[in-house]
């Protein structure tokens, strides 16, 4: 699960640098993509825009926005982008994820489309500029409060080969295909391994894997308990692709859904499993952990269980503060703790 968007309390740095330099942007058809600041949607900067997003929680927020075309989870209809006059892309913290997303967009737009890239310095924006130097000539327009704005003109269009971004590895005899930006892309996370190690062979019923990423946690459980009714969910389009691909490649059957935590869940489960994120792009947050725990009993059958792994640097006193929740620690290391909560 990628926690890329949460409710904001003040204007983001990306929003501020865009607004400060708004006079340079042409008032014509615009593509917005990447980690788009939510605050941008509360002002009508671009009357004609295409908002191309990869994150379902953002889609839920802006899907009713007027004067914009919303494109979500789409690598298959590039003609939507070709007539746009400018592209404004907001960098992610993951350079390979940005490379995947931006390469796709560059392959879809016209060669005359003006390109703007916005991102914090610690997101690696300067290296992204170097990565695309073969295709785009960039000029730095502004740098303020650790945030950069670049303007670029295309030298030549890249060819987008989706398969070049796919990584394959095998863990515990499970085949894992992954894409940049998906949790566990480079290797299986130690927290996931710890959670998986608690699975026994007597688990039955309906199971929900929240924030499935590559699907490794749910698939590992299904490997030990092939009769379970498994559902995998995530907010990131690449994670959904990976979860579907890995279920199929490992010969397991399960449902795979876009859902912002419980937003699209309308049934109850015997077991909910999760290794939730505690980063919101470049910032640390535990809001997703709070929401998973707080609302879990609404989606559990009687005597159902939430089994969740959390970094040990997050105090259990912080997690369960002011909540009348009975929990048990199943397993812990110096880095991670697996909690069990019974309805």
Image: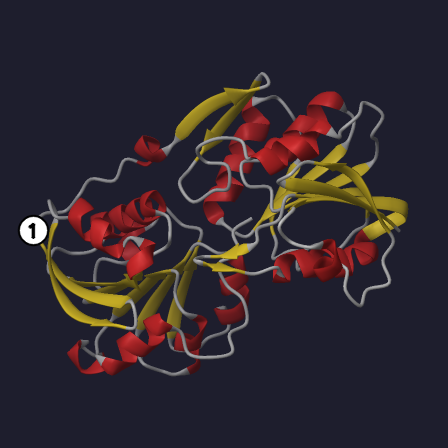
**Res 167 → quadrant:** top left
Q: Nearer the viewer, residue 198 or 145?
A: 145
Provide residue 139's location: percent of width, then percent of height.
Answer: 10, 63
For the residue carrying disc 1, how many other residues have a C-alpha within 10 Å: few (<14), some (14-19), or many (20+)? few
* Residue at the spot of label 1: 155
Residue ID at (32%, 81%): 45
The local secondary structure at tag 1 comes to loop
Provide residue 49's location: percent of width, then percent of height.
Answer: 32, 71
Residue ID at (45%, 71%): 38
- The answer to whether any part of residue 249 appears in the image is yes
Q: Nearer the viewer, residue 103 or 221?
A: 221
* Color scheme of the displayed model: secondary structure
Residue 57 in the figure: left or right of residue 131: right
Residue 244 in the figure: left or right of residue 121: right
- The answer to whether any part of residue 46 appears in the image is no
Residue ID at (43%, 58%): 282
Residue 270 in the figure: left or right of residue 57: right
Placement of 14 over or under 113, stated as above or below: below
Q: Could you tell me how many numbered marks the image carries?
A: 1
Provide residue 195's location: percent of width, then percent of height.
Answer: 69, 35
**Res 337 → quadrant:** top right
Residue ID at (61%, 37%): 191
């Amino acid at each position: 699960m990628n926690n890329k968007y949460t409710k904001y309390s003040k204007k983001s740095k990306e929003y501020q640098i865009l607004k400060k330099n708004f006079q340079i942007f042409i008032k014509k058809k615009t593509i917005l993509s990447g980690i788009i600041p939510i605050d941008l949607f509360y002002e009508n900067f671009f009357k004609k825009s295409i908002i191309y997003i990869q994150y379902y929680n953002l889609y839920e927020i802006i899907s009713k926005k007027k004067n914009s075309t919303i494109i979500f989870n789409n690598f298959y209809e590039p003609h939507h982008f070709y007539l746009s006059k400018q592209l404004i892309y907001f960098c992610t913290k993951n350079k390979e994820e940005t490379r995947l997303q931006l390469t796709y967009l560059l392959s879809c737009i016209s060669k005359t489309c003006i390109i703007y890239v916005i991102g914090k310095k610690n997101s690696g924006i300067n290296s992204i500029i170097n990565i695309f130097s073969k295709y785009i000539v960039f000029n730095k327009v502004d740098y303020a409060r650790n945030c950069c704005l670049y303007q670029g003109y295309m030298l030549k269009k890249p060819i987008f080969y989706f398969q070049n971004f796919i990584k394959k590895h095998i863990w515990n005899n499970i085949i894992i295909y992954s894409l940049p930006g998906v949790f566990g892309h480079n290797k299986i996370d130690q927290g996931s391994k710890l959670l998986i190690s608690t699975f026994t062979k007597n688990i039955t019923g309906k199971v929900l894997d929240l924030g499935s990423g590559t699907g490794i946690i749910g698939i590992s459980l299904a490997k030990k308990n092939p009769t379970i009714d498994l559902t995998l969910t995530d907010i990131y389009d690449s994670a959904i692709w990976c979860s579907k691909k890995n279920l199929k490649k490992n010969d397991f059957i399960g449902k795979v859904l876009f859902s912002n935590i419980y937003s699209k869940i309308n049934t109850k489960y015997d077991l909910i499993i999760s290794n939730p994120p505690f980063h919101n792009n470049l910032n640390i947050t535990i809001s997703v952990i709070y929401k998973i725990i707080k609302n879990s009993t609404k989606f559990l059958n009687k005597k159902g269980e939430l089994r969740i792994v959390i970094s040990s640097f997050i105090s259990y006193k912080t997690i369960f503060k002011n909540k009348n929740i009975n929990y048990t620690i199943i397993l812990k290391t110096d880095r991670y703790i697996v909690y069990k909560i019974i309805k």
